[in-house]
Image (cartoon, grey):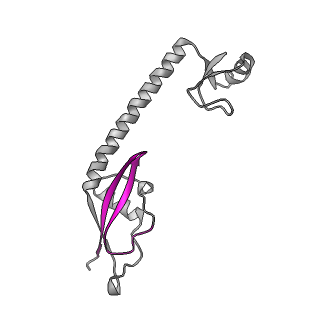
Amino acid sequence: MKVVLLQDVPSQGKQGEVKNVSEGYARNFLFPRQLAKPATPEVLRELADQKAAQDRKEQHAIAEAREMAKKLDELTLDLHVKVGEGGRVFGAVTSKQIADGLTAAGFAIDKKKIVLHDAIKTLGTTVVPVKLYHDVTANVRVQVKEERT
């Protein structure tokens, strides 16, 4: 019997897949637990419509991420830090500080999307990658300057 899985089922498949299972397994396990539906033409058409809607949504998200990446590539973010003797930075610039600076500049970006391998501990300009989507990455120039008091 062919069924469409409504949720991920261990050892059977992922949500949205069409699987061939025994009638007893479908009738006694999958259907009562709302894990699957019989694979009728209406259900298959509904599944195709959901897949198309999901693809359109993903394409829209990719387009937005690319647009934001263009804007971020042009941005130079200025961060001011306290500096001690000899131009040594107290502490370091972290991804949280960069995320706060980007939020102040009008970009709502989570600190987890900022790919900062080591904290920035020197004055000057550093290029920091920001992962906006699966394969969309922007490079933000972060300029660390001495804080004037």
Screen quadrant of the C terminus: bottom left
Screen quadrant of the N terminus: top right
**Residue 80, position as x, y percentages in the image:** 30, 72
SS majority, magenta: strand
Residue located 41% across and 73% down the image: 92
Q: Is 78 or 13 nearer to us in this picture?
A: 13
Q: Is residue 124 magenta?
A: yes
**Residue 96, position as x, y percentages in the image:** 41, 62
**Residue 23, position as x, y percentages in the image:** 72, 16
**Could you say which quadrant of the image residue 87 lies in?**
bottom left
Vertical placement of residue 149 versus 43, above or below: below
Residue located 49% across and 16% down the image: 45
Vertical placement of residue 124 versus 34, above or below: below
Q: Is residue 73 magenta?
A: no
Q: Is residue 39 left or right of residue 85?
A: right
Q: Is 41 or 83 nearer to us in this picture?
A: 41
Point out the residue furthest to the bottom here: 85
Vertical placement of residue 55 versus 91, above or below: above
Vertical placement of residue 31 versus 105, above or below: above
Q: How many marks?
A: 0
Q: Which residues are magenta?
A: 118-146
**Could you say which quadrant of the image residue 53 lies in?**
top left
Point out the residue furthest to the front here: 135
**Residue 56, position as x, y percentages in the image:** 38, 30
**Could you say which quadrant of the image residue 134 lies in?**
top left
Q: Is 68 or 148 nearer to us in this picture?
A: 68
